[in-house]
Image (cartoon, rainbow, N blue to C red):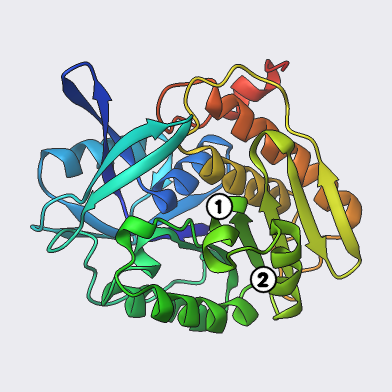
């Protein structure tokens, strides 16, 4: 099982004079992508017992995500108010006192061979310390900071913690926007190289319509992004990470030390780019099922 750990929240997306609720949260989206692509996936995080929480649970179960590690709570569902500015999503959050505030980690069983970390759970005090404990779990670890500045109370401290996590992860997935926040005035590819030099085994940088590049011990691997009509970019990065992990998992490569090699990385990036592109053609964070990819011709 690949276990995605972090927040499950409700995105509130403007629709006319109202807001349309859609299940979201970066770790949730990764878990849903994995489940829909036929990988055994689980979700570790708080799930509220309120109406939004029940809807999120149904969404996860319908996407074949195991909820054995989810923690039910009477605290309300965290919310993200989403707007699009110049084609990019912007967020405002309601997090304090919500189901995000997990107090302890459940014990992981032997079926969990990989863990995905990131999102708000690693940026929000004090819950970040709970989820950061998964770095000690002895499993393959993928990290996607998925930086949301509106949710970061102490930027300097968060940057320090991130720098401490980097050498402990097998796969670090970052966007150009993430790197612009961590390393202002540094070109994204130069910043990604710095992170690999700092100890991350493999760094994958997503560049939106310009594709993606992976930084391996053997060198760099680049792929182009499929050309599609973008309806909604929300969740595309999460779908990319889910596609990447699904490809490597099905190839039996999510081991430690992580050494996917150049050709398997090129194939994984191309597959993940197709998953992300198809996600962009749909409203909301709605990653595709494996069967939809078979008929997808960008």
Q: Is residue 99 visible?
A: yes
Image height check: is 230 above or below 234?
Answer: above
Does residue 276 appear to the left or right of 93 in the view shown? Answer: right
**What is the distance, in whole Å, between disc 1 and disc 2 at their CAs?**
21 Å
Residue 210 falls in image quadrant: top right
Instruction: Pick the residue in front: 35 or 186.
Output: 186
Instruction: Pick the residue in front: 236 or 31.
Output: 236
- Element at label 1: helix
Q: On the rendered image, what quadrant is the C terminus found in?
A: top right
Residue sitting at x 42%, y 78%: 156
Q: Which residue is mark 2?
A: 170
Image height check: is 127 above or below 81?
Answer: below
Residue 45 in the image: state x and y as whole percent.
31, 60
Q: Is residue 137 visible?
A: no
- In front of the other: label 1 or label 2? 1
Residue sitting at x 25%, y 26%: 14
Q: Which residue is mark 1?
A: 177
**Earlier-in-chain disc, 1 versus 2:** 2
Graded by Cα atoms within 10 Å as few (under 14), some (14 to 19) or many (20 or more), the crowding at tag 1 reads: some
Residue sitting at x 32%, y 56%: 150
Disc sitting over residue 32 in the figure = none
Image height check: is 237 above or below 45?
Answer: above
């Amino acid at each position: 099982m690949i276990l995605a750990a972090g927040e499950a929240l409700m995105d509130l997306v403007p629709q006319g004079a109202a807001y349309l609720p859609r299940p979201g949260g970066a770790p949730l989206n990764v878990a849903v992508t994995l489940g829909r692509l036929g990988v055994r996936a689980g979700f570790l995080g708080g799930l509220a017992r309120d109406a939004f929480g029940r809807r999120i649970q149904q969404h996860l179960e319908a996407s074949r995500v195991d909820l054995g590690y989810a923690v039910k709570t009477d605290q309300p569902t965290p919310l993200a108010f989403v707007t699009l500015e110049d084609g990019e999503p912007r967020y405002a959050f309601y997090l304090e006192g919500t189901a995000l505030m997990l107090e302890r980690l459940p014990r992981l069983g032997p079926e969990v061979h990989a863990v995905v970390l990131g999102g708000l759970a690693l940026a929000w005090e004090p819950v970040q310390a709970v989820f950061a404990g998964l770095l000690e779990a002895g499993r393959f670890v993928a990290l996607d900071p998925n930086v949301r500045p509106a949710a970061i109370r102490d930027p300097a401290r968060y940057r320090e913690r991130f720098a401490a996590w980097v050498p402990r992860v097998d796969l670090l997935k970052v966007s150009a926007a993430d790197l612009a926040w961590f390393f202002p005035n540094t070109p994204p590819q130069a910043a990604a190289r710095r992170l690999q030099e700092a100890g991350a085994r493999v760094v994958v940088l997503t560049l939106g319509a310009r594709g993606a590049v992976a930084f391996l011990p053997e060198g760099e691997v680049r792929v182009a992004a499929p050309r599609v009509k973008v309806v909604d970019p929300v969740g595309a990065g999460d779908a990319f990470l889910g596609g990447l992990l699904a490809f490597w998992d099905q190839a039996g490569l999510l081991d430690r030390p992580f050494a996917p090699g150049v050709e398997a990385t090129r194939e994984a990036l191309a597959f993940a780019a197709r998953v992300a592109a198809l996600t962009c053609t749909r409203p909301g964070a709605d990653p595709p099922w494996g069967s939809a990819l078979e008929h997808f011709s960008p």
